[in-house]
Image (spheres, coloured by chain):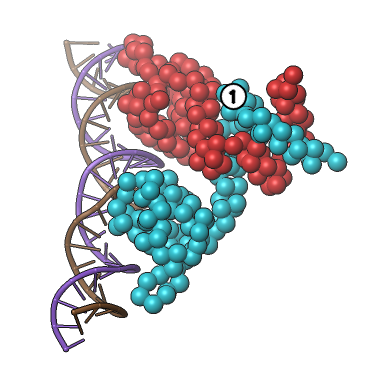
Chain colours: A cyan, B red, C purple, D brown
Amino acid sequence: MSEKISEAELVVMEALWETSPRTANDVAEQVTASRDWSLQTVKTLLSRLMAKDVIAADQDGRRFLYRPLIQRDDYVASESGRLVNRLFGGRVSPLVAQLASQDQLSPEDIAELEDILKGLKP
Amino acid sequence: MSEKISEAELVVMEALWETSPRTANDVAEQVTASRDWSLQTVKTLLSRLMAKDVIAADQDGRRFLYRPLIQRDDYVASESGRLVNRLFGGRVSPLVAQLASQDQLSPEDIAELEDILKGLKP
DNA sequence: TCGCATCGTTTACATCTGTAGTCAATAGGC
DNA sequence: GCCTATTGACTACAGATGTAAACGATGCGA
């Protein structure tokens, strides 16, 4: 569901998922802390996200307050699913095996994975 | 390491990872089984992959035999890592939790995950 | 009330991507 | 030896993306 969110647009979405509703300036301020973008760039990205119907804006006097229309969880789920399908034929365990072999699994990850599995087993 | 591989280019890479070295026609034949592309399109994608230095071609008479320069495992590892970093702050378990909550975990996945964890525990 | 600061909107432009046609070299058949 | 089919190279072009300047409305302070 909903159009593809590009890399740059995602940065803006993250800001909105973190706090919303908020103004364009407010978003830009947070975003430019990590990316060296101009205010105009952030505004363009907000427009494009509006066009893609993944955010909405409510007028507040002369400005707009932007808020996400899709949940981060939903986005993350669909992206994760896409990756698993694209690279692992839809199987999750090869992905984890891959990450494990890269030492990307922290002890906390391991403990939490055990809990997850326990929860799925009963 | 190495340039970004686009979605369409990845389809061609998959064909080369599966069998290589092979000719452009050979690749195209396999690829067009799943995508409705012309031979020219596949050749263009091969050129771009060459430009990105992720494949190489060895002359064989009047034609070329193409082969990957990067391993599928390496690509998959870096893409997986990118996703985990981008969406889960580098933590793997939230990703699995996410997939689990979407019922994307098959019983085989669960069994294999248990094995993976067992292997990491001793 | 008048100019300026502030927003959002429109326009711009280079690059990347998807998709493919055309061209030029060349090798093999007749 | 000449024509044709094959093959890689070059060119094309529309849409997406990254990045941003210019423009236009409008409300606020003087």
Tag 1: amino acid: Asp
Tell which of A31 and C5 is nearer to you.
Answer: C5
- Within 10 Å of disc 1 (Cα), the crowding (few <14, some 14-19, many 20+) is few
Give the residue drawn at x 49%, y 38%.
Answer: B35
A4 shown above or below B68: below
Name the residue: 72% across, 30% down.
Answer: B113
Task: Provide residue A18's location: percent of width, then percent of height.
Answer: 51, 55
Foreground residue, A96 or C11? A96
**Image quadrant assignment for residue B118:** top right
Where residue C12 sits, quadrant-wise, is bottom left
- On the image, the x and y values in percent for residue C21 come to 29, 39
Residue at the spot 48% in from the left edge and 52% down from the top edge: A14
**Taking B120 as reference, is A85 left or right?**
left
Q: Which corner quadrant holds the C terminus of chain A?
A: top right
User: Which x, y percent locates residue B82?
Assistant: 50, 35
Describe the element under mark 1 as helix, strand or loop.
Answer: loop
B71 relative position to A64: left or right: right
In the picture as drawn, the residue positioned furthest to the right comes out as: A122
- Whether residue B96 is visible here, answered yes or no, is yes
Q: How many marks?
A: 1
| Residue depicted at 76% across the width and 29% down the height | B114
- Is residue B30 at least partly visible in the picture? no
Based on the displayed image, in which of its 4 quarters is residue A121 positioned? Answer: top right
Above or below for C26 versus A85: above
State which chain disc 1 sits on: A
Q: What residue does disc 1 label?
A: A103
